[in-house]
Image (cartoon, rainbow, N blue to C red):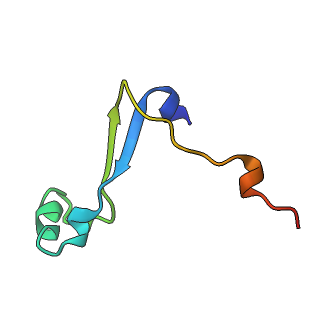
Amino acid sequence: MHATVHRTAAAFHTQPLELPRLRPEVRATIPSGQFPQMILRLGNTTRGRPTPQRSTLAVLSAG
């Protein structure tokens, strides 16, 4: 919520880690030689779309 208020967007980019031919290239960008587990892109945005959300009643059930 804090990031959204400040117009910061986040996106996961996992495809380079899922494709065997791209993994060595991604790993070469990490100086410590460790194995990356996820790629997360952060950036500021001035526009965006609201995320569709279901109402509380549609998600919860009495029972």
Q: Quadrant of the N terminus?
A: top right
Confirm whether residue 10 shows in the render. yes
Residue 12 locus on image (x, y percent) = 35, 54
Q: Residue furthest right?
A: 63
What residue is at 38 percent from the left and 27 percent from the top?
47
Q: How many marks?
A: 0
Residue 26 placement, left or right of 2: left
Residue 7 locus on image (x, y percent) = 43, 28
**In the picture shown, does residue 5 fall above or below 41?**
above
Residue 39 placement, left or right of 2: left
Residue 9 placement, left or right of 39: right
Q: Image quadrant of residue 36?
A: bottom left
Q: Image quadrant of residue 17?
A: bottom left
Residue 11 placement, left or right of 2: left
What residue is at 33 percent from the left and 61 percent from the top?
38
Q: Residue furthest bottom?
A: 20
Task: Give the camera-side residue of 24 and 19.
Answer: 19
What residue is at 16 percent from the left and 75 percent from the top?
20
